[in-house]
Amino acid sequence: MSKGLPDDDLLQKLARLIADARVGRGLNQVEAALAAAVSKSAWQNLERGRRLDGRPFRPTEELVTAAATAMEIDLAKALDLREAAVSNKESPKPRRTRGAGRKLANADRRRDLGRIYRDLRPEAQEIVFDVAERLLNLQEKDARTDPEPEEYRGPDTSK
């Protein structure tokens, strides 16, 4: 394990576990992200084990749980790999964001939506998929133009 960085081998094992489960279910990455109620970019980083800029991706426990639940893989195994990969004591602590509590509170609702999606007829899934893909694209576009999404900002005190 390199000093200050998560264990790349374990991150890659976790990435392969998630990717193999997705492929085994016949889903593409957008469908899998929708089923897990996570962003497409978070799903892609999870499967890659790295961010696009090459930095290690340290998935949160919530992300791993959502992915494992959606792909019906052994949650304990996935969390063990995640914990072992990111437990290096010299690793920098993840930055806490203001919206984290709200996101966790909505996680169950999003998982329920993923389950509802899986129960829809294929025609309805296609419509939902198209809408979700458009929304994800808009979200990514907004993220590129606005470095700090509104949900993470504090109250407006400029008045």
Image (tube, grey):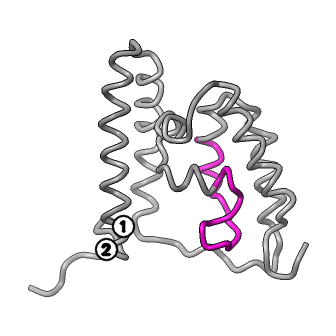
Residue at disc 2, secondary structure = loop
Q: In front here: 128 or 62?
A: 128
Residue 139 percent across, percent down from the top left: 34, 57
Q: Is residue 54 magenta?
A: yes
Q: Furthest residue to the top?
A: 121
Relative to residue 61, is residue 127 drawn left or right? left
Amino acid type, residue under disc 2 in the picture: Asp
Q: In front here: 107 or 52?
A: 52
Instruction: Assess whether mark 1 and mark 2 are in contact (beta carbons under 8 angstroms).
Output: yes
Range of magenta residues: 46-66
Residue at x 14%, y 87% (from the top left corner): 158
Amino acid type, residue under disc 1 in the picture: Ala
Q: Return the residue at label 2.
A: 146
Q: Return the residue at label 1.
A: 143
Residue at disc 1, secondary structure = helix
Where residue 134 sits, quadrant-wise, is top left
Residue 60 percent across, percent down from the top left: 63, 57
